[in-house]
Amino acid sequence: MIVLSKIKKLIDIFNAEGMTGVTNKIKSKAEYYRLEKIIDRCGTKLRIAYTKVCYGKRISYGKGFISRAGFAIRFNNLGTDRRYIKIGSGVFFNRCCSITCYDSIEIGNNTIFGENVRIFDHNHRFNLADVPVSGQGYTYSPIKIGNNCWIGSNVVILKGVTIGDNCVIGAGVVLNRSIESGSLVTTESGIKITKIRHKSASELLTKY
């Protein structure tokens, strides 16, 4: 059973020998995954404590909440007086996700997020031709994400969006409209694949 003292030893090894030294000390995949879970739990507790100190009652977390490295929450003082974030039980955020709140953001139970998900309940105003965008202020509207949803990596969720229960949002989607429960959302732009026409050195010399 890996305990916190072993984590400290591994950190010391990492500082001295790099990741290779750490890898040599972990004897099995099972041990690695146990270590990863402990680090996730410790990191989550620190992030919860930090946001509670900074934002107090404006933010609440359900039981079993887990967030990995790079998870960030930010409230902006330019938003509404009622601004808050409510995160349900069993919610998981993978690495480098962020939530920025000007109004309100609610996340249901057992919803999971892939890496690099961004949630914004606001947008810049940009309609005044003679005023820089940075000086025009913001519009904002609540976001609600239902229970048991899977939000894929690199998804961006914009202001005013409501996502029903049991939805899947595919990787890379920019979501600017509400969707009903039980929906699957993906991008349909596709990718273009063409063959590379390689040239010989003699062809290139002839050209020049």
Image (cartoon, rainbow, N blue to C red):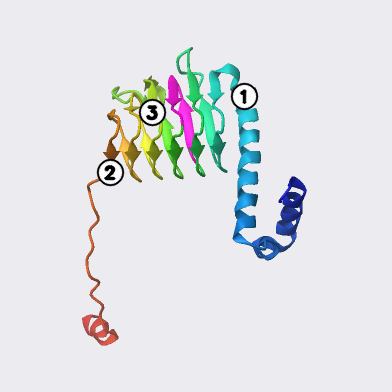
Q: Report the quarter where the C terminus lies.
A: bottom left
Amino acid at dot 3: Gly
Residue under label 2, please give it: 186
* Viewer-side residue, 10 vs 189: 10
Q: Position of residue 113 (x, y in %)?
A: 44, 40
Badge nearest the viewer, 2 or 3: 3
Label 1 sits on a secondary structure element that is helix
* Viewer-side residue, 87 vs 50: 87
Residue under label 1, please give it: 52
Mark sitting earlier along the chain (2/3): 3
C-alpha distance separating marks 2 and 1: 35 Å
Task: Assess whether mark 3 and mark 2 are in contact (beta carbons under 8 angstroms).
Answer: no
Mark sitting earlier along the chain (2/1): 1
- Name the residue located 70 percent from the left edge and 58 percent from the top edge: 14
Graded by Cα atoms within 10 Å as few (under 14), some (14 to 19) or many (20 or more), the crowding at tag 2 reads some
- Residue 146 is tagged as 3
- Name the residue located 22 percent from the left edge and 85 percent from the top edge: 206
Label 3 sits on a secondary structure element that is loop
Residue 136 visible in this rendered orientation of the protein: no
Mark sitting earlier along the chain (1/3): 1
Instruction: Tell me where the magenta segment starts and ends, as one range.
Output: 97-109
Badge nearest the viewer, 1 or 3: 3
Looking at the image, residue 10 sits to the left or right of residue 65; the answer is right
Q: Quadrant of residue 143?
A: top left
Looking at the image, residue 31 sits to the left or right of residue 194; the answer is right
C-alpha distance separating marks 1 and 3: 23 Å
Looking at the image, residue 198 sits to the left or right of residue 27; the answer is left
Amino acid at dot 2: Thr
Amino acid at dot 1: Lys
Q: Quadrant of residue 106?
A: top left
